[in-house]
Image: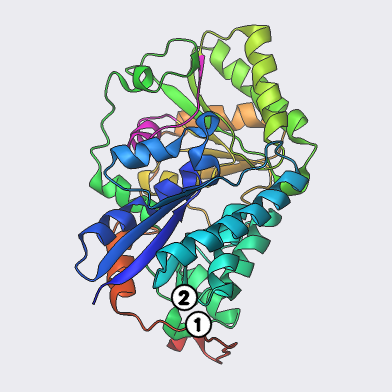
Amino acid sequence: MTRKVCVVVNSRANYGRIKSFMRAAQAHPGLELQVIVGASALLYRFGEVIKILREDGFTANAVVHSIVEGETPTTMAKSTGLAIIELATQFDNLKPDVVLTVADRFETMATAIAASYMNIPLAHTQGGEITGSIDESVRHAISKLAHIHFPATERAREFLIRMGEDPRTVYLTGCPSIDLLVETDLSLSPDLFERYKGVGATLDSSQPYIVVLQHPVTTEYGQGFAQINETLTAIRRIGDRGMQVVWLWPNVDAGSDDIAKGLRMFRERYHPAYVHFFRNFGPEDYARLINNSQCIVGNSSSGLREGAFLGVPCVNIGSRQHGRERAGNVRDVPYDADTIEASIESQLRHGRYERSLLVGDGTAGRQIADILAVAPLSIHKTISYIKDIASV
């Protein structure tokens, strides 16, 4: 008898972090894949991920419209509540045997609450990681609601067990996002930039470029405009010296409008001949994009995760990734234009780093599928403390 596994895809990051599992589940004789697409994954201005998902051969069994516009702490809270209501209806319709939720976003919290209150076993990827900000609180809360855990690193596995999770439910698999880097031809097609349109200068994919992704930090709401202007000042200096810049639009978190305002004002004031702004790239094309870049700049976890595996230099700005494990490719800097500029220049001089397997070796999706096909499913859990974590 096959198990119905329901995956909720709520954002472009969600999809890239779980696509390899979805592919493995589709092919697995013991699993039936169900997909719910919701939140910003449905919205045009955040890349309309549902179109990419369908082009990749996946079927959306249901869609959930849950984003309350405004990108403020209030709208985030309301969006979470609305998503709980809508997901409960869809879980009731689909009747999955297990729900798989990804990482630490507010939409992920809605998935976890709806599933756990409906007595549906909940599986969770990327638990046990440290980052600070609201993301860390959300991540740990989901871990306490989850019944099966798929951490990406050994430290994360250890932390989950120290949090009282039963070691028998914690499976160290690595992060599925790394799978795409192993399975994909990472050479850059000449028409990549043209295919994803966007706005800004015409870029030449055969010439060096850097990638910038800077998202709002929810616990620093109201500071995003000043923060992004520091980054923009540094990037303008780098660009004026001849470096091309691929800039991805911020995500839907509270404060996104402040960052978007800074980007629009910069674009209208300077009409930069070296920057092109994009809404989104498909997961494989995003892998190609960063693999062929000279440096990843901003505060996206992809600089610390995919960047580590690829050895791409990363300049990590601000507090959004505070405490997260990192490899040697990362340099941490504050919101200061001079420091950001100097660190980018230093990373450009350094070039590629040695590959790190910190967050996986490219087999996570298949491992998760195999485990979910046979693992005991139970909605009962209690705190489990052991004396010697190294022994489990």
Q: Position of residue 61 (x, y in %)?
A: 38, 53
- Residue 172, numbered label: none
**Which sits in the foreground, 310 or 320?**
320
Number of numbered discs on residues: 2
Residue beneath the point at 69% across and 44% down: 217
Which amino acid is tagged 2? Pro
Quadrant of the image containing the C terminus: bottom left
Q: Is residue 141 visible?
A: yes
Q: Quadrant of residue 49?
A: top left
Real-space CA distance between mark 1 and mark 2, rounded to the nearest whole angstrom? 5 Å
**Which sits in the foreground, 171 or 237?**
171
Q: Quadrant of residue 297?
A: top right
Q: Residue furthest bottom?
A: 387
**Which sits in the foreground, 321 or 221?**
221
The residue identified by callout 2 is 121
Quadrant of the image containing the N terminus: bottom left
Q: Is residue 167 magenta?
A: no
The residue identified by callout 1 is 379
Q: Quadrant of residue 85?
A: bottom right
Which amino acid is tagged 1? Ile
Q: Residues within 10 Å of mark 2 (few under 14, many from 20)?
A: many
Q: Judge from the rendering whether residue 42 lies leftward or rightward of residue 134; answer left or right.
A: left
The first of marks 1 and 2 along the sequence is 2
Residue beneath the point at 34% across and 72% down: 372
**Magenta segment, which residues?**
275-294
* Secondary structure of residue under mark 1: loop
Residue beneath the point at 26% across and 24% down: 189
